[in-house]
Image (spheres, grey):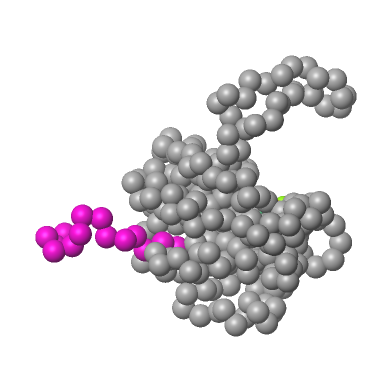
Amino acid sequence: MSANLPAESPPEVGVLLAAAGRGERAGRGEPKQFRPIGGIPMLLRAIRPFAQHPCVRQIVVALPAEFAARPPEWLAELRGPRVSLVAGGSTRSASVAAALAALDPACSIVLVHDAARPFVSRETIDAVIAAAQSGAGAVAALPVGDTLKRVPPPGDRILETVARSDLWRAQTPQGFPRAVLAAAYARAAETGEPATDDAQLVERLGHPVRVVPDRSTNLKVTTADDFLLAEALALR
Ligand code: CTP
Ligand code: MG
């Protein structure tokens, strides 16, 4: 490395946006990621903080195949060297894998984010990038605040209260050195073992993954009620 370079030059960050779901729990109508919140489509709100970030070189958005082929106008307008659109898959992991395969090779740090989280803060993005740059995986997360009960199906009887002191809720973005995430997805393709987030695949490699304290405003919009909360957050 040249002696003239700063010790830590800014990383080239690639962002994979998982937006290929059907939004079934949000009810009928267009897929939730395209629905407006405070007049702005949820996916556009999710893209913006990354598009405005100086370290982000490229954003790859995984969409349902029919929307990748014919995106809404506001999304088609963004397409270019910095934003590309790909067809996702039948699971979230397959969608992220498709986006990763399309990512600019120059991106050495990769952030994965759910289009269903339209209110991620700049502070969280910065903290996840910094942790990933140090070599570990990084998960935006919140300490669990509720009391947790174990209720074995099919009944409604509580078996026990689960100690929560060391439990965190994993959110997104999740950030990784690119080689680590690529290795995790290569292994997942071999084993076929399902995972509900990207960190889980990296944990299986035995690679360290850390939590980065996030804000509760970075909520995931899942149900119709969540849209009510999101509308209120959009007023801030
Ligand atoms: N996602 C994806 N590809 C899939 C499934 C989900 O890219 N095959 C994305 C969703 O678009 C969303 C994120 O993963 O941004 C988190 O998933 P979730 O909140 O479960 O969204 P949906 O799968 O769309 O909703 P539902 O499970 O209610 O159908
Ligand atoms: Mg889903």
Q: Quadrant of residue 35?
A: bottom right
Query: Most prominent secondary structure in the magenta stretch?
Result: loop
Q: Is residue 176 left or right of residue 27?
A: left
Kindly identify the residue that appears in the image at 58 percent across and 24 percent down.
165
Q: Is residue 212 left or right of residue 95?
A: left
The picture places residue 121, in percent across and down from the top left corner, at 54, 56
Circle count: 0
The picture places residue 100, in percent across and down from the top left corner, at 50, 61
Q: Is residue 64 left or right of residue 104?
A: right
- Magenta includes 100? no
Q: Is residue 90 above or below residue 143?
A: below
Q: Quadrant of residue 22?
A: bottom right
Kindly identify the residue that appears in the image at 79 percent across and 55 percent down.
228
Q: Quadrant of residue 160?
A: top right
Kindly identify the residue that appears in the image at 31 percent across and 61 percent down.
10
Q: Which residues are magenta?
A: 1-14
Using the rendered image of the protein, determine whether residue 99 is visible from the camera's viewpoint.
no
Residue in the foreground of this view, choosing between 127 and 63: 127
Q: Can you name the residue that lies furthest to the left here?
A: 3
Kindly identify the residue that appears in the image at 57 percent across and 66 percent down.
47
Q: Is residue 152 left or right of residue 174?
A: right
The picture places residue 219, in percent across and down from the top left corner, at 66, 50
